């Protein structure tokens, strides 16, 4: 079936798959580095406890057959190594079936992590990575031309990401319709980046232009993805430009990077030759001297079958898009094959941060020192750093905890208990532990109001932030109260 091949998307496929492999690598690397404190056998939300109450049918995962911290580490490291190999182009050196198996293995490994990740993995970009990863299995490698149905599935996924995000904003916070949300967003976003201070201080008329441009790109432009070339490529380029703006202005893990990857998958070679120094695609088929072989019948059958599955599973996400009660970042199946997306339907006007402190004074009268996190705001003179596409899960959840204690209920007391015993796995998630030798006697959590300083304040004080104490979120507390939350065997650790 000659119509099944779309050789003009060979380079687009390659760019999408390489960037997808990079994002996969970030996900597996974060899992390997962070899981022991968050999800391990002695973690804040232990996976064994989760597996004991949630059956396989509700959360498919390899860990239902067996779990140990050693196995989890092996899964994460295997995924990271396989991602690196695919990023380097290993899939193009394999037979078609073996390349598909490599992408499928990557998807199974990450699905096993996400489905047992609980609160720490309750982010829309986890489902987006899994949906894009499942699609990658069926895009083939350099042994065959890209399947036409695969390119349309990429467009359908990108459409739902952008249009869903646009609708949730338009239906959500009134500041989006008033074009004023960006008066606040750069300052109150979950994890600002090194340029966020500068974006926040752009002129307010430009903030309105940002908001208006966002509505156009997310509510109008996505329909261009389904039009002939070069219109579809033009729509994708506008989305890429918007995503690069977001990458520069904050840290949103791999959400924007993966959206860029999807948009690159829409660009035909003609467009890519105008924006990148690349040559033309080879024509499809041996008669044209191409390096491609014919698409095997079994491969075309699998691609067609997967396209029909996506079509069937798209009903509920599509109905959600059209609903007045639209839900964002919702998975509609346990395998995360077709999902609903959206972000920032509501924008905070004020930034609150929880600052954790400890003291060796058993009476809590003095000697309080602050714990520092790598990404979230802390000391006012520290410029926010760029971490995306790497994902700092604890830093993100601390932002939610500052908004509402309900977001932190399952893990906050276990976190404090681990600080009281200097748990090494937990301390590895922090930037600075003020008690490296002896654990504190007491810890507390204080709620602060943070705002960006203005230009004169920055020049006078060297501080990027101004903060004001609001109240104590957690009064001073010690192991006598939190010992039951400490890691097994740690509560009695000598001081």
Image (tube, grey):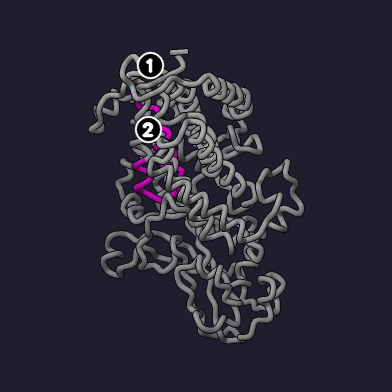
Q: Nearer the viewer, residue 463 or 243?
A: 243
Residue 381, quarter of the rendered image: bottom left
- Marks 1/2 in contact by CB < 8 Å: the verdict is no
Residue 116 sits above or below residue 299 on the image: below
Q: Which residues are magenta?
A: 244-268
The image position of residue 38, as x and y in percent, is 59, 61
Give the residue drawn at x 57%, y 28%.
Answer: 321
Determine which residue is flagged by label 1.
228
The image position of residue 252, as x and y in percent, is 45, 48
Query: In terms of secondary structure, what is the magenta stretch mainly?
Result: helix
Q: How many marks?
A: 2
* Horizontal side of residue 442 vs 13, given as left or right: right
SS at circle 1: loop
Residue 381 sits above or below residue 345 on the image: below
Determine which residue is flagged by label 2.
264
Give the residue drawn at x 59%, y 22%.
Answer: 305
149 part of magenta stretch: no
SS at circle 2: helix
Cα distance, mark 1 to mark 2? 16 Å
Residue 358 can be seen, yes or no: yes
Q: Nearer the viewer, residue 280 or 34?
A: 280
245 part of magenta stretch: yes
Q: Nearer the viewer, residue 391 or 277?
A: 277
The image position of residue 12, as x and y in percent, is 37, 30
Few, some or many residues within 10 Å of mark 1 (<14, 14–19, 20+): few
Give the residue drawn at x 62%, y 59%.
Answer: 39
The image position of residue 276, as x and y in percent, is 25, 33
Residue 172 sits above or below residue 348 on the image: above
Q: Nearer the viewer, residue 360 or 4?
A: 4
Q: Quadrant of the C terminus?
A: bottom right
């Amino acid at each position: 079936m000659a119509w099944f091949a779309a050789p003009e998307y060979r380079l687009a496929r390659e760019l999408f798959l390489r960037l997808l492999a990079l994002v996969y690598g970030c996900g597996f690397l974060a899992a390997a580095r962070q899981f022991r404190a968050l999800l391990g056998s002695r973690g804040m939300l232990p996976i064994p406890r989760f597996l004991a109450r949630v059956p396989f049918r509700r959360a498919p995962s390899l860990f239902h057959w067996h779990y140990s911290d050693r196995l989890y580490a092996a899964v994460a490291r295997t995924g990271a190594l396989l991602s690196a190999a695919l990023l380097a182009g290993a899939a193009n050196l394999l037979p078609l079936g073996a390349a598909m198996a490599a992408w499928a293995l990557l998807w199974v490994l990450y699905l096993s992590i996400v489905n047992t990740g609980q609160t720490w993995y309750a982010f829309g970009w986890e489902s987006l990575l899994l949906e894009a990863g499942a699609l990658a299995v069926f895009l083939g490698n350099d042994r065959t031309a890209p399947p036409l149905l695969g390119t349309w599935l990429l467009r359908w996924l990108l459409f739902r990401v952008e249009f869903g995000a646009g609708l949730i904003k338009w239906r959500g916070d009134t500041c989006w319709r008033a074009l004023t949300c960006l008066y606040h967003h750069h300052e109150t976003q979950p994890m600002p980046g090194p340029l966020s201070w500068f974006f926040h201080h752009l002129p307010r008329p430009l903030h309105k232009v940002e908001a208006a441009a966002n509505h156009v790109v997310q509510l109008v432009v996505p329909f261009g993805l389904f039009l002939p070339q070069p219109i579809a490529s033009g729509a994708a380029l506008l989305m890429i430009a918007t995503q690069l703006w977001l990458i520069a202005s904050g840290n949103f893990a791999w959400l924007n990077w993966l959206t860029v990857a999807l948009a690159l998958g829409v660009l035909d070679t003609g467009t890519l030759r105008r924006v990148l120094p690349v040559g033309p695609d080879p024509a499809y088929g041996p008669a044209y001297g191409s390096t491609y072989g014919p698409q095997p019948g079994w491969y075309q059958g699998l691609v067609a079958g997967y396209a029909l599955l996506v079509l069937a599973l798209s009903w509920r996400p599509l109905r959600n898009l059209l609903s007045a009660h639209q839900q964002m970042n919702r998975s509609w199946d346990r395998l995360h094959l077709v999902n609903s997306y959206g972000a920032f339907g509501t924008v905070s006007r004020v930034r609150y941060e929880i600052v954790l402190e400890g003291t060796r004074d058993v009476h809590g009268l003095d000697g309080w020192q602050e714990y520092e996190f790598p990404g979230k705001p802390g000391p006012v003179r520290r410029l926010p750093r760029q971490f995306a596409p790497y994902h700092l899960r604890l830093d993100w959840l601390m932002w939610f905890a500052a908004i509402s204690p309900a977001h932190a209920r399952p893990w906050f007391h276990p976190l404090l208990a681990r600080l009281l015993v200097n748990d090494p796995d937990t301390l590895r998630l922090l930037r600075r532990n003020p008690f490296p030798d002896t654990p504190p006697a007491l810890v507390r959590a204080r709620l602060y109001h943070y705002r960006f300083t203005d230009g004169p304040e920055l020049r006078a004080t060297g501080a990027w932030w101004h903060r004001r104490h609001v109240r104590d979120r957690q009064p001073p507390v010690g192991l006598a109260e939190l010992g039951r939350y400490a890691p097994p065997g740690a509560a009695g650790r000598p001081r």
